[in-house]
Image (tube, grey):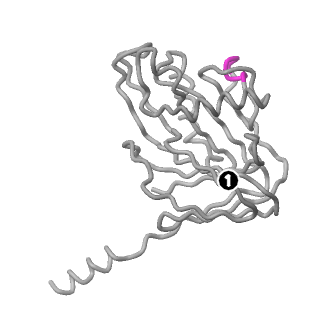
Amino acid sequence: MTRLLLCLVCLLSSPVWAVEFSSSKQQATVVELYTSEGCSSCPPADHWLSSLKSDSRLFKTLIPMAFHVDYWDELGWPDRFASKQFSQRQRKLVQQGLISQVYTPGLVVNSQEWRGWFNGERELALITEPVGQLTAQYDDNELVVKFSEQQQYELNVAVLGMGLATEVKAGENRGRHLQHDFVVLELYQQAGAAEWRMVLDDLPEQGQQQTVLAIWLTKPGSLQVIQAAAAVID
């Protein structure tokens, strides 16, 4: 019995293994979906984004993210994943000339508006342009990120929720059971060059089946993605 208790103590006190991940040396393809549970046109786009879970390129050269906007919230159903920050991000994409207007569902691929989805396109072409390599280590709530290019960048870190579901009780999607993946639950930024350190305490918990960290670099003041990487952390 004593030996068994000692073994249990050792297991419980063992350190959590660090998660290490990196991009390739070619630019990753980043897919941003701007969506809302209050929008009846959004579930098909959400479903398509979820289908990328089976893509062999996932989290290697393909990084999907769903930003739930809040400008639908007063029209019948408050989306629990929605954020004013994400609505402002979409508006900033317009201001920077990367998309034409604010709407849902809105798809942005490699920092450019992608209307091909509305014409039945579902396949994404990967970028082959070589850029610097992004490496990261997440250990005991601390994230350390390094980039091979010595310039000033903005590090963006998104906590993504996988396997989320909502029973919608009002609004355009009333009575529907909506399922979501790649939902941005929190977004952080930090300026710097070559190396960043960030403590991520109290990661958001919304009932997700898995938690993913997605990281990407932009130049200061720009939303144009330079390089990205992601990994499941829980």
Asked whether, in this view, residue 37 is left or right of residue 85, the answer is left
Q: Which residue is nearer to you in this view: 202 or 174?
A: 202
Residue occupying the point 55% across, 52% down: 213
Instruction: Answer with left or right where residue 1 lies relative to residue 201.
Output: left
Considering every residue shown, the one lying at the far left of the view is 1
Give the main secondary structure of the magenta stretch: helix
Label 1: state its secondary structure: strand
Residue 79 vs 5, above or below: the answer is above
Residue 89 image offset from top left, x and y in percent:
64, 34
Left or right for 95, reference 214: right
Q: Residue at x 76, y 32 (%)?
A: 112
Residue 82 position in % (x across, y down): 49, 31
Q: Position of residue 226 (x, y in %)?
A: 77, 48
Image height check: is 44 above or below 20? above
Q: Position of residue 234 (x, y in %)?
A: 45, 56
Residue at 56%, 41% in the rendered image: 54
Quadrant assignment for the N terminus = bottom left
Location of residue 177 (image quadrant): top left
Based on the displayed image, in which of its 4 quarters is residue 102 positioned?
top right
Q: Nearer the viewer, residue 34 or 124?
A: 34
Toward which corner of the image does residue 63 lie, by quadrant? top right
Q: Determine the residue located farthest toward the bottom in the rendered image.
A: 3
* Magenta highlight on residue 99: no
Q: Nearer the viewer, residue 55 or 90?
A: 90
- Type of amino acid at the residue the image marks with label 1: Leu
Q: At x 57% / y 63%, what residue is drawn?
A: 143
Count the marks: how many? 1
Q: Which residue is mark 1?
A: 155
> Along the horizontal axis of the image, is 191 left or right of 200?
right
> Vertical placement of 83 versus 210: above or below?
above
Q: Which residues are magenta?
A: 115-120
